[in-house]
Amino acid sequence: MSELIYLLTGSNLGDRTAMLDVALEEIGKEIGHVTAVSSVYESEPWGFSADEWFLNQIIVCDTLLDPGEVMTKLISIENKMGRRRLETGYTSRTIDIDILYFGSRVIDVEGLILPHPRLHLRRFVLEPLCELAPGFMHPVLQKSNIELLQMLSEPGTVNKIGV
C-alpha cells in the first residue's frame, strides 16, 4: 500500500537551484510519484554559521517503499550529488534530504526517527510545509502544521523565492 511522505530538500553549496532540481528528479525516479512541490524558500543556516544561505523545498511523494528503504535511497541520492557527511554538527552541504512525515507513522529506531524530531522547531521547514499541508496533523504533538508554525518562537529569516 502506498503512503504519502513529506520530504525537505536543502542546499547551500554550488548551484543551489540546480541541486534542488536534481534532487526532485531523483526522488521521482527512486522513491515514488511526486504529487506536490512547494515554492523555493531561502533561509539563513540553522545551528551553524555560513556565508551562503540555504534554498529549501518541500516535496510530497507517494511511495510504495518502507521507511528504511526510503532512507537508504535518500542517502544514496545525497552521496551521488556530492554530499559529504561529517561525524558531528551541522555544516554547509550540496544537498540535504530529510523525511519529515511518512504518512502518520511514528518510528524511533537507530538512524530513523519519524516524524522528524526537530521539524516543529524550524521555520525553514514549517513555512514551505504550510504552503502544501497546513492542516496536516503532527502524529505525536497532535497539532497541525499551521498551529506549529504559529507557536514557533524561533525568529529565523525565511523568504519565499520568486514572489
Image (cartoon, grey):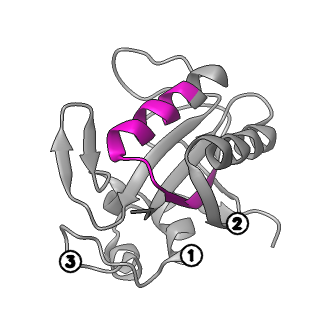
Give the residue type that dot 2 points to. Answer: Ser
Where residue 65 sits: x, y (%)?
43, 47
Of residues 92 and 77, the one drawn nearer to the viewer in this rendering: 77
Residue drawn where x is 49% and y is 77% of the image: 133
Q: CA distance from mark 3 to mark 1?
A: 18 Å
Instruction: Identify residue for label 3.
Output: 142
Q: CA distance from mark 2 to mark 3?
A: 26 Å
Q: Quadrant of the C terminus?
A: bottom right
Residue situated furthest front in the rendering? 1
Instruction: Identify residue for label 2.
Output: 39
Q: Earlier in the sequence, mark 2 or mark 1?
A: 2
Residue 67 is a magenta residue: yes
- Span of residues in magenta: 56-76
Where residue 54 sits: x, y (%)?
63, 44
Residue drawn where x is 51% and y is 35% of the image: 74
Where residue 117 sits: x, y (%)?
26, 51
> How many residues crowd mark 2 within 10 Å: few (<14), some (14–19), many (20+)?
some
Instruction: Identify residue for label 1.
Output: 132
